[in-house]
Image (cartoon, rainbow, N blue to C red):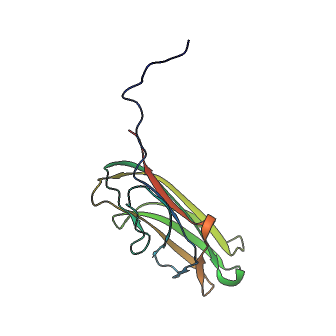
Amino acid sequence: YAFTGTVTGAGGVNTPSFFATTSTQHSITNQTDTKIQFATEVVDTDNCYDPSTNYRFTPTTAGKYHIFLTCSVETQGGVSTFNYAFIKLKKNGSLIYQSYVDSSNNNTYAAQGVVNAVVDMNGSSDYVEGFINCNASSSTIRTQTGEYMMFGGYKIIE
C-alpha cells in the first residue's frame, strides 16, 4: 500500500548551526587558557558565529545545542617535549566541559583532544567558545590547521 497523504506536525530544523576551522597555526602560551581562533567559517546558517573578533557562537534561538570542539597541538620542530593538554569548552566565559590528553610518558610532540556536549542556550546572550591549555617543556606550542581543528554546533530538534 502506498501512502499518498500529508504528514503534519513532524520535522523541524537544526538551525542555527555553524562550523569553523583554522587555516593558520597559532602560538599557544604554556600553561595558560588560550582562546582558539577558528577564523575559517565553513557554515553559519544564521550569522551567529563570529570568525573575526571573539571566535564565539551566540545563537539567536533558545534551545539545546550539540556543540563539538576538536583541537590538535604540537611543539615546534617536532621536539618530543609535550606533556598534556586540556581542550576546553566555555559558556559565557566559564568552563562547562573539557577533555584531557596526557602525553608525558609517551615521548610525543603532538596531541589531539575532542569535546562533544549538549548545551542549553537562551537565544540572546549565551555564547560558547573553545580554549586550550597545554604544558610542554619546549619553548613554542602551536595549533595545527584545517582538518585537525574543528568547532561547530547545531540546534537539537526537540
Residue at x 44%, y 51% (from the top left corner): 154
- Judged left or right of residue 75, residue 69 is left
Rendered image quadrant of residue 146: bottom right
Q: Residue furthest bottom?
A: 139
**Can the viewer see residue 13 in this picture?**
yes
User: Looking at the rendering, in which quadrant would you find the C terminus?
Assistant: top left
Viewer-side residue, 83 vs 127: 127
Viewer-side residue, 9 vs 84: 9
Residue at x 46%, y 54% (from the top left corner): 153
Residue at x 47%, y 65% (from the top left corner): 88
- Judged left or right of residue 1, residue 46 is left
- Judged left or right of residue 136, residue 19 is left
Viewer-side residue, 42 vs 156: 42
Q: Residue furthest front?
A: 4
Residue at x 30%, y 54% (from the top left corner): 123
**Can the viewer see residue 38 in this picture?**
no
The spot of residue 144 in percent (x, y) is 61, 73
User: Looking at the rendering, in which quadrant would you find the N terminus?
Assistant: top right
The spot of residue 36 in percent (x, y) is 49, 72
**106 to 127, vertically: above or below:** below
- Judged left or right of residue 19, residue 73 is right
**73 to 128, vertically: above or below:** below
Viewer-side residue, 126 vs 53: 53
Q: Residue furthest left?
A: 124
The spot of residue 78 in percent (x, y) is 71, 80
Rendered image quadrant of residue 27: bottom right
The spot of residue 46 in percent (x, y) is 38, 56
